[in-house]
Image (spheres, grey):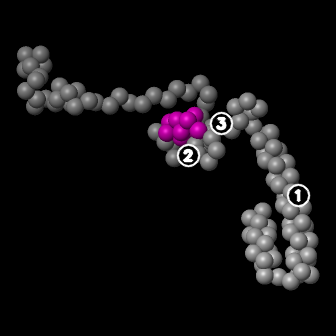
Amino acid sequence: RDELNSYADSLRREMGTASFSESRNMEKKLEQIEDDDGKVKDALTHAHREYHSAFHPRWGQMFVAGYQDSRFGYFVKNYACLYTSKATNLGLASTSRAFRTSGELLPHDNLLSDKFSEFVDDEME
């Protein structure tokens, strides 16, 4: 469609300087371009509907919203990155498998677990 529109724009610019017979030919070409543009638009609309009919009727695509990752897709990708290099690898795991992250130690936990820390009472060891 972009090429057709660019060509039509160039014809419209040339029509101002063209003779009467040339401008009639250009008008015919512009009419043909408008018809072709309508056909292309109808074909793209049909292809767009067919593409989206492959997804859930209400939710649509689960992992993308427009050209960006959906919120759900963002969380799945981040979740998958914890355990694997690709989200598709999660398809190989059992559906009953529970994934849990290991607990991270906070700075105060590190101090308490360090045997050289002043906070640890020697009598407790």
Residue 86 — which label?
2
**Of label 1 and label 2, which has the lower sequence position?**
1
- Looking at the image, residue 70 sits to the left or right of residue 8; the answer is left
Q: Position of residue 92 (x, y in %)?
A: 62, 38
* Residue at the (10%, 31%) spot, across then down: 116
Nearest the camera: 28 or 94? 28
Q: Position of residue 40 (x, y in %)?
A: 84, 58
Nearest the camera: 84 or 44? 44
**Of label 1 and label 3, which has the lower sequence position?**
1
Q: Split into 4 quadrants, where in the image is the N terminus?
A: bottom right
* Residue at the (78%, 72%) spot, across then down: 12
* Residue at the (75%, 70%) spot, across then down: 9
**Of label 2 and label 3, which has the lower sequence position?**
3
Extent of the magenta region: 70-80
**Real-space CA distance between mark 1 and mark 2, rounded to the nearest whole angstrom:** 40 Å
**Residue on which disc 3 sits:** 62
Structural crowding at the residue carrying mark 3, measured as other residues with C-alpha within 10 Å and reported as few (<14), some (14–19) or many (≥20): few
**Residue on which disc 1 sits:** 39
Which of labels 2 and 3 is toward the front? 3
Disc 1 secondary structure class: helix
**Real-space CA distance between mark 1 and mark 3, rounded to the nearest whole angstrom:** 31 Å
